[in-house]
Image (spheres, rainbow, N blue to C red):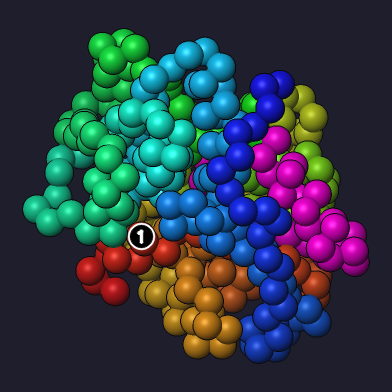
Amino acid sequence: MIPPVPLGTWPTPVEAAPRLAARLGLAELWFKRDDLTGLGGGGNKIRKLQYTCAQAIAVGAGTVITSGAPQSNHARLTAAAAARLGLSCVLVLAGPPPPTPRGNLLLDALAGAQIVWAGDRPLAEVVAVEAERRSAYVIPFGGTSTESVQAYVDCARELRTQLPAIDGAEVVVALGSGGSMAGLVRELGAQRVIGVDVGAVPDPRATVAGLLVGEVEPNALRIDGSQVGAGYRTLTDAVRAALEITAGTEGIFLDPTYTGRAMAALLAGSFPRGDRLVFVHTGGLPGLFGHPEL
């Protein structure tokens, strides 16, 4: 494996959350603050980009290209990583351009990324055309690949060092493109990790198992699908409540797509769990400002 390029600030903090733990009926709750990874507003994608950008540099690429929704945290952090490494960045985003750019879109532009709007065309098709035209290195959706799974093995190893008693705790993480959950499962085991599906992929169980290349059976994975709702971009009442409760008890801001859904599932008691949990905060704060309905 190509060694990762340094992009973040490690280890990210682990913080106790006693007031929210009491609200949830937990003996102990910790937040693993991967929203504080340092670069570009922070978030879990920085861990993965250390591996994917290393691959781009190794093949001599001068431009990287990736895709996502208009408020994609991965797109924002790819733009920031490219700026840090002196690479050009192209972002292929779903749908038409919005009337007013908000949230992550403003930060994409500040980091110097060129945005290509896919309109009604499939994202993968537009990425393929643009990548060939620009001789760009393609960073996959969500930065997730079998290689970048190692990024969340790294995170789990940090947790073992920071919380020596973690072997008795379960870990809750939002499940988007699957790489964060896959890395945690590789290091901690399938029974210790609970992924809350946000609706980013059609078959999250097969996606995570596929990234682990035969290491775990899909049915062994603990995946909660209760918070997908009407779709990936839809803000639900349960998520809004989760944002308010977490901010009101611990002063920690969650995002409306990933961590908000994971916390909504935890508050609803949607899955069996013990009384000692680590909640992986994967970032996404700028996405709050992309939802004017908040």
Q: In which quadrant is the N terminus drawn?
A: top right
Q: What residue would you read off at disc 1?
A: 287
Secondary structure category for the residue under label 1: helix
Residue sitting at x 21%, y 26%: 121
x then y, percent, for residue 237: 38, 74
Q: Is residue 126 magenta?
A: no
Residue sitting at x 66%, y 69%: 31
Against 12, is 39 above or below? Answer: above
Residue sitting at x 51%, y 21%: 57
Question: Which residue occupies the foreground of this view, 184 or 24?
Answer: 184
Question: Which residue occupies the foreground of this view, 276 or 266?
Answer: 276
Question: Which region is colored magenta?
Answer: 150-177
> What amino acid is found at the position of numbered circle 1 in the picture?
Gly
x then y, percent, for residue 70: 28, 46
x then y, percent, for residue 19: 66, 89
Q: Is residue 218 left or right of residue 129?
A: right
Q: In which quadrant is the C terminus drawn?
A: bottom left
Question: Which residue occupies the foreground of this view, 183 or 64?
Answer: 64
Question: Which residue occupies the foreground of this view, 99 or 174?
Answer: 99
Quarter of the rendering containing residue 23: bottom right
